[in-house]
Image: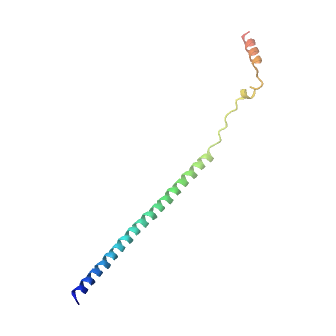
Amino acid sequence: MPAVNRRATYSLTAAVLLLLLGMVALFSVAKRRNQRLADSAIDLQRNTSQQEKIIKELQQRLDDCAPMVLPTDSSWRNASQIDSASVISQTISSRK
């Protein structure tokens, strides 16, 4: 085999090996990226389920709380019936 053909063969073999190494490196990077994305998706699902549990717990607490019934102030009900003249007359009569 002449020296030129042997040199060309070695060069082509080296080029093919470098291309194969580059492809292996790209595949490993893609695999790591895919694994990171899968892990992130699992973390998001876990966080979402935890937040849903917290929301359900808070809704249950809210449902369990007795509705707060404040006593009604009866003086407001009669406020429309009270006028200034009656207040003045009551004040004057209470001073006597």
Quadrant that contains the C terminus: top right
**In the rendering, at what x and y percent does residue 45 appear?**
51, 60
Q: Say which quadrant the N terminus sits in.
A: bottom left
Residue 4 found in image quarter: bottom left
Furthest toward the top, the residue is: 96
Picture residue at 36% right of the left edge, 74% below the top: 23
- Find residue 80 and report its image quarter: top right
> Residue 53: where, in percent of width, then height?
55, 54
Image coordinates for residue 24, horizontal then vertical, percent: 36, 73
Q: In this figure, what is the number of numbered marks?
A: 0
Q: Quadrant of residue 71?
A: top right
Front residue of 90/36: it is 36
Q: In this view, does 43 lie to the left or right of 57?
A: left
Q: In this view, does 87 lie above or below 74?
A: above
Question: Which residue is at a point 27% across and 83% down the rendered structure image?
Answer: 8
Query: Does residue 92 appear left or right of residue 7 in this picture?
Result: right
Q: Nearer the viewer, residue 30 or 50?
A: 30
**Relative horizontal placement of residue 47, taking residue 19 as reference (left or right):** right
Q: Is residue 68 left or right of residue 38?
A: right
Q: Is residue 10 above or below residue 92?
A: below
Q: Which colour scheme is used?
A: rainbow
Q: Which residue lies furthest to the left in this view?
A: 3
* Residue 43 vertical position relative to residue 84 in the rendered view, above or below: below
Residue at the image point whose x is 45% and y is 63% from the top: 37
Q: Which of 73 and 51 is in front in this view?
A: 51
Residue nearest the viewer, comparing 4 with 80: 4
